[in-house]
Image (cartoon, helix red, strand yellow):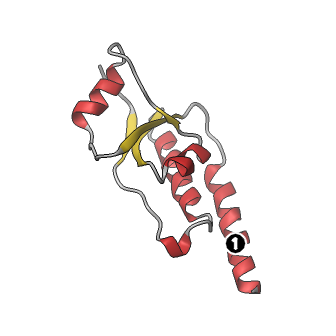
Amino acid sequence: DKFNFVEVVLFATHKDHERCGFGGLLSSLILHKSFEVQCDKVLLRASKAATPFWCSQGFKAYSYGSSDSLGAYNDTHCLQLPETCQMKRDIKDKFRWVELSLSKCRNVDQMVGDA
């Protein structure tokens, strides 16, 4: 089988930058670039602490049966980290991910500048 997917190997923002929109912007760039290169899925393994963030970005826990060759491929060929949850997001349509995330980051930047 041939798969068109992106695997996110490592993704993090520094604690000082949490809740500023930068993680959402990085996630948006991954989705945008994945769509550009005609990948229709993004797979990753999230730590338990990061799972709520990824859920907020539209990812869902990805459990699969023996007939799911993409899940089986991911389990045997992609990076495995202990105590992580496999997650997936399907990309069906082009969306304005990057523009929306950039506007959120600008709003945060303005709020910080006004303080």
Position of 7 with respect to 107 (left or right) is left
- Residue 38 in view, yes or no: no
Q: Position of residue 2 (x, y in %)?
A: 31, 24
Q: Residue at x 65, y 67 (%)?
A: 105
Quadrant of the rendering where the N terminus is positioned = top left
Q: Position of residue 70 (x, y in %)?
A: 35, 25
- Residue 52 in view, yes or no: yes
Q: Nearer the viewer, residue 37 or 113?
A: 113
Q: Residue at x 40, y 22 (%)?
A: 64
Q: Residue at x 59, y 40 (%)?
A: 58
Task: Specify the amino acid type for callout 1.
Answer: Val
Q: Residue under circle 1?
A: 108
Tell me: residue 56, above or below residue 23.
above
The residue at the far top in this view is 67
Quadrant of the rendering where the C terminus is positioned = bottom right
Tell me: residue 10, above or below residue 51.
below
Say what secondary structure mark 1 lies in: helix
Q: Residues within 10 Å of mark 1 (few under 14, many from 20)?
A: some
Q: Residue at x 55, y 72 (%)?
A: 17
